Amino acid sequence: MSAWFSDLTLLGCFLCMVLPIASFGLIMIFTRNNHKLSLAISLLCSTIPLMIAWSLLYRYWDIAEPIVYNYDWILSDFIKIPFGFLLDPTSLLMLTIVATISWLVQIYSIGYMEGDPGFGNYYAFLSLFALSMLGVSISSGLLQLYICWELVGVSSYLLIGFWYEKFSASEAGKKAFVVTRFGDVGFFMGLAILTIFYGNLEIANINSAAVAQSMPPWLISTGALLIFCGVMGKSAQFPLHVWLPDAMEGPTPVSALLHSATMVAAGVFLIARIYPFFSASPEAMAVALALGTITLLLSSTIGMVATDIKQVWAYSTVSQLGFMIMGLAAGSYFAGYFHLTTHAGFKALLFLCSGVFIHHFGTNDFFVMAAKGGRKLIIPMVTITIAALALSGIFPFSGFFSKEAILGALYHHPNKIWFLMGLFGAFLTAYYTFRVIFVMLFPKNSAPEEKHGHDEPHEEHHGVPWVMSIPLLILATFTIILGFCQGYLERFLLGHTLHHEHNYLLLVSAVIAALSGIGLAWLDWGSKKAKCVGFISYVPALENFFKEKWYMDHFWRWFLNAFIYGTFSRLFTYNDRRVVDGGVDTVAFSTIGSGRLLSFLQTALLQLNLLFMVVVVAGVGLYLLMGR
Amino acid sequence: MVEHVADFPYLTCMLLAPVVGLTIILFLKEEWHFLIRVVSLSAAAIALGLSIYTFVNYDTALGGLQFVEKYEWVKSFGIYYYVGVDGINAPLLLLTGIVIFTGVLTMWELENRVKEYFAFMLALVTGVFGVFMSMDMFVFFLFYEIAVVPMYILILIWGSTRKIYAAMKLTLYLMAGSGLIIPGILLLYATSGINTFDMIQLHGVHFAPWVQKTAFVLLYFGFGVLAAVWPFHTWSPVGHVAAPTAVSMLHAGVLMKLGAYGILRVAMFLCPDGFQYWAQLMALLAAVGIVYGVFVGLAQTDLKYVIGYSSVSHMGIVGLGLATGTVDGINGSVFQMFAHGVMTALFFSAVGYIYDRTHTRMIYELGGFSKIMPVASGYFIIAALCGAGVPGFASFWAELLVFISAVKVFPVRGLIALASIVIGALFALRVVQKTFYNEPNPKFIHFKDVSPFLGLPRAILVATMVLFGIFPRLMLDLIKSAVVPFVNGL
Amino acid sequence: MKFMMDLFSAEGMATLSFLGVVGLTFIGALIAVGARNIFHNVLGLALALFGVAGLFVYLNSPFVAMMEILIYVGAICIAICFAIMLSEPLYLPKPPRKPIKLLGAGLASGLIFAMLGLLMKKTTWVAATERSTDWSITTVGHFLLTKYALIFEVISLVLLVAMLGAIVTARDGRGET
Amino acid sequence: MKVLLFGPELYFLGMALVLFILSLRRQVNIRIDHQVALGVAAGGVVVASACLFQQGELFFAAYRVDLFSQIFKVALALGLFLVLMISHNLAHIEDRYHAEFYLFLTTCTLGLMMLVSAVELLTIYVSLELSSYSLYILVPLRRGDDMDIEAGVKYLFIGAVSSCFMLFGLSYIFGATHSTYVNEVMAQMPALLQSPIGIMGLLLTLAGFFFKLSVFPFHFWAPDVYQGAANQVTTFIATVSKAAAVAVLLRLVALGDVYGFGFTQALWILSIVSMTLGNLVAIVQKDFKRMLAYSSIAHAGYVLMGILTLSEAGYTAAIYYAVAYLIMNFTCFMVISEVAGDGRNLQIVELAGLYHRNPLLGLALMLGLFALAGVPPSIGFTGKLLVFTSAMKEGYFWLVLVGAVNGTISLYYYLKVVYAAYFLEGKELPKITTGLSTRALSYALILIIIGFGVFPDRFIELARVAVKGVLL
Amino acid sequence: MINNVETYLYIALFLFAIGLYGVLARRSLIAVLISVELMLNAAMINFMAFNRFLAPHPAVGQIYALFIMAVAAAEAAIGLSIIVAIYRKMKSINVEHATELRG
């Protein structure tokens, strides 16, 4: 036990795990109804991990060898699950991102969730989420990671369904949990298979080069693909992306935290985490690349037609996740992970800003916000624009650098189609992002009538409370400076800087794609003469297709209804009632029936009974005599 | 197997605590409700305390049977009162202690025929304790029957919803199971050549293959009925629905484990070759049960039916783990027995509280209970999450162990069963959503939330789940200490 | 002719009279179960019992034959006659017999006959190695008072019980209070 | 002390005499009748117990007194005493016949006592007839409807035909072995059973005992007689006479050494058919006594199972089971005669609300039924399991399987009675008041049912020693 | 040639079968009782035959026959009394009229 205290690093990791769960437990059991105390506990328990994360990052900036702590958690016979921490650049960076964003969101939520009756619960759930996400970051083994990964799912379920009185919220929570679970089952199968064939699932071990050589290729591919199922679920890749847009039913800070910056990034992080293993399977890489691309295009197109601001950012998240997967799958570990980092910053910013608008105007529709004078909220408007620029990949914001890195990776991929797709995705991203920005910035009908219609319901919101704006400013700062840290991060993550041969064709095409997207958005939504209809509406069929979200929701609903409920469940239930239970009842009734039948043997007629008796005696006697 | 004789008859005391409680209750007046409750609670508390004592004081380094007491009972037939604890039954004794204690607390508000209720319940518990600690087949079976029969009256009098049918069905079903068990154990006894029912000694006998095959399949199906092995499970949802809360808790929580424990302790222990022969079938039925349970549960509208089918599914996991015959699988199975016991007890306890107030368990009539009684619903949600196999609860580890070893031994069946946990999640959350989320039903809005005292049993159960969920080694090392020699003997 | 000669020899006469006794028994028995009039049945029974008594004579024990006639014909048959007179009047029309019932009865008794006949066929009887030739009634009496003393006492109890029972059961006014 | 050897029999003969004198009185006083009978019967239990460990032979080896017979004599004396205990309200027997009622019960018991000791075929036969005749008279002694007399007729004629078969069998045995002493006969049995005559002789001989025990196909009287006879008479038939039949069956079978395959196979079949038929038909019964009759047919099958194992363990189990059956069956009948205080036949539904009309009786009934169904912890369970164990030891796997499955079936109808007693509301029905003796009896029975179920060892050991004596 | 044990056994058997037929076929209870007596007589013949030809001591079979007679007498007494009683109650001694107990 003394080792736990003498080794500060270990103690730090340990605290990162213990404090959030302590906070969760304390709040749930004791202080649920005391908002202030709950807040204090929760903040305390998120600030310390934050400080630990940054100090660890600082301390191990020049880390050469990963630091591993392992303790036995489960010691069964074949299955041994260690509980431990693995500190290497990948995990340290993620740890920092998670700690930071979750701290910021907790601060922000003070304002956003003020007065909510479930305030205590909310912070408890946030703590639980922090626990699980921190656990994902620093787990030393894949099974431990899986456990935290599942906890992420649980806390996201609780947070999405936080406003459980709303049917849509509880439905969305359920959907998120089940859909991610769908992927997780694949993940777990992968883990099971790897455990069986390989046994030791420590990440340090899995990633070692020896493993890739000792395992047959089919096993690596199977394992990698199955694990990728989990990634598809958590990181909302096609076709399991459907839960993410619905998940916006949760409070906006939750969307910012879970569904943009951390939880959805967990999938990408997982690939980065076991990148050496993953990249040993070309099949898995190809599948990932294809699915990432499909996801990117699909969600971008849907984002183009959405009117709910959070929906837009949700689809944008999906598309950016697709981008990250593409980057990773194209062979560039750094590009994907770097985009994850920058994306965490600017997407959280986007959501938090939107949250301010939503909180202020009480609506999710950005047309309405614009009409109500959204641009008058200066800080959010400025920061949201910064974030939008970053998202679109405009220099000098962070997104530019990371996106360029990904496009670079795609460019180097032998098949250029992926690169073109990436470019197209970048174009679409810029378009839908600035569609929102332009609508907000240049409202077409700036005098909404309803202002006269009834009392201004949000009169009390004068400006934005500081607890909400400070996180915005911090994130905006990050968004601006993070791009320039690319070199440092490269050295940190890879141990060396990449040799950048500046490919101007690549650079130019990326910038052109982004700018043309913005330009198109300007034409459609921004300029004075804009008709405020997307170019896509010229192709109504396509627009409808996009509006219906490529019919993916319909597909899943149909799948669920037709197969799960309609076929299996119904048939099994029928079988249970009629065949199994009916069979048993039949046996029972036929027993009674045979009893009734046999009771006719006992006729009231004495002589008939005697006759029977005599015949049986004779029969038995004859039987006995026959053999002799 | 190494035996360590007890210095004090802990196990006998554990067994006698409910008996003494029962006897005292029989001499109390019907009207003295409070006294009756207190007596039952103290009996349960003593049993719980002793079970915790044995659980904690079991020396895993020493291994083998500990706290052994062995007395000759019926000499001419070689029947012994032979009790002992090893890593397999220690958790189950603990489980029984916990469930009976919380069960008594859960039924604290009972007003109808209190005396008889607690008397029967204590009789039932005596049987359960006896089964778990017996190392003699005859005594094992004796207690097994004692545990099964009081159910009939408990359901009949204090039950609800088609209780007459359910009680009869359950009892007959289980007794039919016994009808298979008797020939099974007697076959082993008769062919052993040593005139004893002592399982440890019988383990040393190498039975002829046909004996093993026959005895195993008889015992498997006989005990399997109680363990709700598909397709002999239909008594279980019906029975759970009809039974009063604490009985459902005991029943799903503990009684179903008797079946699984019997398969493990008697069938597999004594007929290793038979087990090898039938393992494929066991795995198949278990996998079918897992998948089937969730799918059927998905279509149910009665809360208790839902839980009943989830039990079918979860007991399938136990069966699957046993079928693997590996240390991991059996570890997982035993752990799952414990975890599922606590979990289901929690489920029923939570439902019971709601049902006692609303008098409906129809999912579509409920709704929004998170708003009306947040704590009570919280317990249910926790149980549902356990049921969905969420980490942090004991059941997760069990499922993990079972599934991995199942995939290893029976890849196809294992993977199919594993896949069904998605449906399991859907299944659990569907109920939670329909019952506890959305707008509350105005009819129920005036109900009070559960008070700390009434919440105590549920809190104990949750605490147990979490304790062993976070520190699985507390239990797993213990289980392993018995399972490793067990599997080596297979 | 040979046959006739045999028939009229001493042995033949013995055989003939034996056959006569057997015939008497069977005819009596057949009347006892076959006749429709209940009195004829009793008479048939008496006839059969006489036959049986005759058989006993052939079986070397005139004492038992005499007891047979005394107890059976003298007591039981008379008792049956009294019972007949105490019960159903004879002039009442009787319902027709059911052939199926008769057939069933015949089959069942035929089966028993077949079974035991088969048994007879398959069995070879072995006489005891040492056989006493003491046929005197004195010995029977001696046996009754030594070896079978208990049963001799018990049978009196049986008869007492039967008598008491008959009185209790058939006493007038039974069951009409 | 030769008298002690014959002590119980002499005592009961004296008792019969006393009752006979009682029956001769002009003035009828049923209370005195009952008290005298009960008191003397209690003395009978004492005497029988006192003679428990007597050993010896009487009447030129026709009568054997050993532990086996003495155990059964105690059981019989106890059974009679118990039946007299619940005879305090003989509502369906005319007052003036009470003394005769007791008398016939006593003579029947006496006959049964001789039966269990008799080792000579004629003695066995006459003792059997003595007990049977007493019962033939007791059955139609009931007042009221015509059922009793009908039952009496059926009982009589089925009994008469059975005893004819038995006599025929006895004659074959006599012819084949030239002896009428059981030990001499059985000494030749192993060889004899290879021949048809031995098998058939034994089979036909057993017919008489099968009739007493109501084993299929000699069971037809049982339901009618149970239903038709007065409750107390039924009780006696169902308990005491069954136990004696088991005893003598056991002695007959036990003295032979190893029987041929065919013979045990025949018993095997009869056993299976008995229990299956009894259990199945019992399901559909509405009259409680009739149901118990069918259950007794089934139980005869179980006892037969123990006997046909032809092993020491099997006999021990059969003895245990017979005594257990006596007790648990008696418990049910006690409840019947208490609930149906006016002596009527009890429908199962009439037990409604018994648990609050008289909780003690309810408990006793439940335990008795559970014991009959073989549910632990009760003598019924232990007995059944012992029987199964011994059968399995001899390799009768299918027999045990069928028996066990039958146990399940039987549970159904026993539970229906429990259901009526514990669940059906009988609020409007009056409470049942029981006297001190009945209460004490109930407690004693409950204690015995559970106590001997949980601690059967003493009794099993006793039975085993007894069997060993018989097997000599 | 006829004077051997088998002859008598067959005679007894035939008598037994006739008696059995009577028991099974006759409706009058008295006739049934008569048939039972025939069966008892058959058994008696058996005993006497064995006694005559096979038994070691000729007294035993005779004693058997005597006791069977006594028992038969007792049986007849009881039987007849019950028959009389049933006639009093049901005004009939037809066995087919006693059909109240069934099932």
Image (spheres, coloured by chain):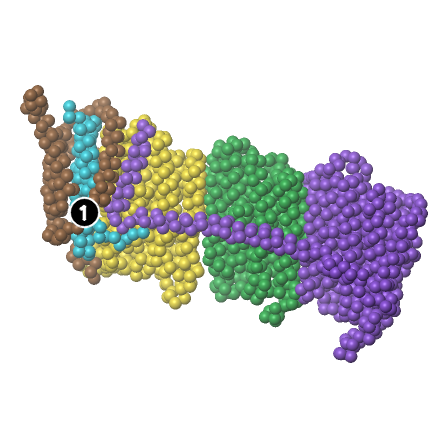
Chain colours: A purple, B green, C brown, D yellow, E cyan
Mark 1, Cα crowd under 10 Å, few <14 / some 14-19 / many 20+, is few
The residue singled out by tag 1 in the image is C97
The N terminus of chain C, quarter of image: top left
Residue shown at the point (67%, 60%) measured from the top left: A171
Quadrant in the picture for residue A447 = bottom right
Question: Where residue A172 sits: x, y (%)?
Answer: 70, 60
Does D168 appear above or below A23?
A: above
Question: Where residue A539 sits: x, y (%)?
Answer: 76, 59
Q: Secondary structure at mark 1?
A: loop
Quadrant in the picture for residue D426 = bottom left
State whether residue B282 appears in this view. Answer: yes
Residue placed most toward the observer, A179 or C89: A179
Question: Where residue B51 sits: x, y (%)?
Answer: 60, 50
The C terminus of chain C, quarter of image: bottom left
Residue shown at the point (78%, 37%) measured from the top left: A211
Residue shown at the point (60%, 48%) measured from the top left: B291
> Label 1: chain?
C
Q: Amino acid at mark 1?
A: Arg
Quadrant in the picture for residue D146 = bottom left
Residue placed most toward the observer, A552 or C29: A552
Residue placed most toward the observer, C177 or A414: A414
Q: Is residue A144 left or right of residue E80?
A: right
State whether residue D69 appears in this view. Answer: no
Question: Where residue B146 sits: x, y (%)?
Answer: 49, 50
Residue shown at the point (80%, 49%) measured from the top left: A325
Q: Is residue B272 left or right of residue C62?
A: right
Residue projecting furthest to the front:
A538
How many marks do you count on the picture? 1
